[in-house]
Image (cartoon, coloured by chain):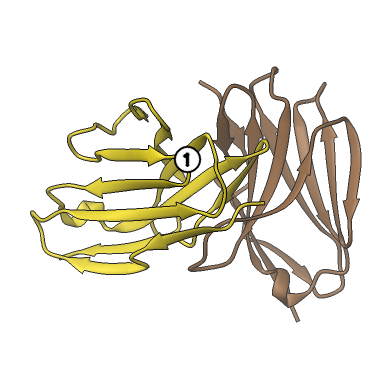
Chain colours: A brown, B yellow
Amino acid sequence: QKEVEQNSGPLSVPEGAIASLNCTYSDRVSQSFFWYRQYSGKSPELIMSIYSNGDKEDGRFTAQLNKASQYVSLLIRDSQPSDSATYLCAVYGQNFVFGPGTRLSVLP
Amino acid sequence: SAVISQKPSRDICQRGTSLTIQCQVDSQVTMMFWYRQQPGQSLTLIATANQGSEATYESGFVIDKFPISRPNLTFSTLTVSNMSPEDSSIYLCSVDSYGEQYFGPGTRLTVT
């Protein structure tokens, strides 16, 4: 069974700090990797996608992928209280598999 | 990206009744998905709906309980049949657009 694992959290960081969210996956043939943000009561919103090993930066967000280690992470720089949400990792190999999500709390 | 709308946004239904949720996309997509998300939980895939073929259901979900229609490339419906309080959840439609998955706003269902 293909799995995607994340720490459930909550992960608490002070405003202005770097938040680091981690995700591991079991399917070695996975090709595409995604991070979604979900605010309470809202649907998931795609914030980052990454397909190749290394880093991909978009504003305050950096996604990191290491296929050899089957590991993908999301760094949020200069964290803001508005970043407080649940972050879902998703992996696409033969189909989409979502992780359980990590709840992030950014403290003012 | 794709813009997705769902109707209704929320409903309160009585036990034993059925509710049909509609999902409309602003562009043609091959693959549409239906998820359920219970409070504080992650996403659970119910089924994948491709136009022109029967929906593919995940383990634990059956067509009699969750019939799905996919009449064209921009529209799908999910029916929750013979509802019980355990069906109370948020139901989400999503689509695969150029290898990325986008979600509708969801339908919040409460069964009393």
Is residue A22 rendered to the left or right of residue B20? right
- Mark 1 lies on a secondary structure that is loop
Residue type of the residue flagged with mark 1: Leu
Nearer to us in this view, B104 or A13: B104
| Quadrant of the image occupied by residue A17 | bottom right
| Quadrant of the image occupied by residue A15 | bottom right
Is residue A1 rendered to the left or right of residue A108? left
Residue B55 on image: x %, y %: 35, 30
Q: Residue at x 70, y 48 (%)?
A: A35
Residue A27 on image: x %, y %: 64, 21
Q: Which residue is drawn at 54% across and 53% down?
A: B103
Q: Mark 1 points at which residue?
A: B73
Q: Which residue is drawn at 76% across and 43% down?
A: A49
Disc 1 crowd, CA 10 A, few/some/many (<14, 14-19, 20+): some
Is residue B13 rendered to the left or right of residue B9? left
Residue A101 on image: x %, y %: 59, 50
Outermost bottom residue: A108
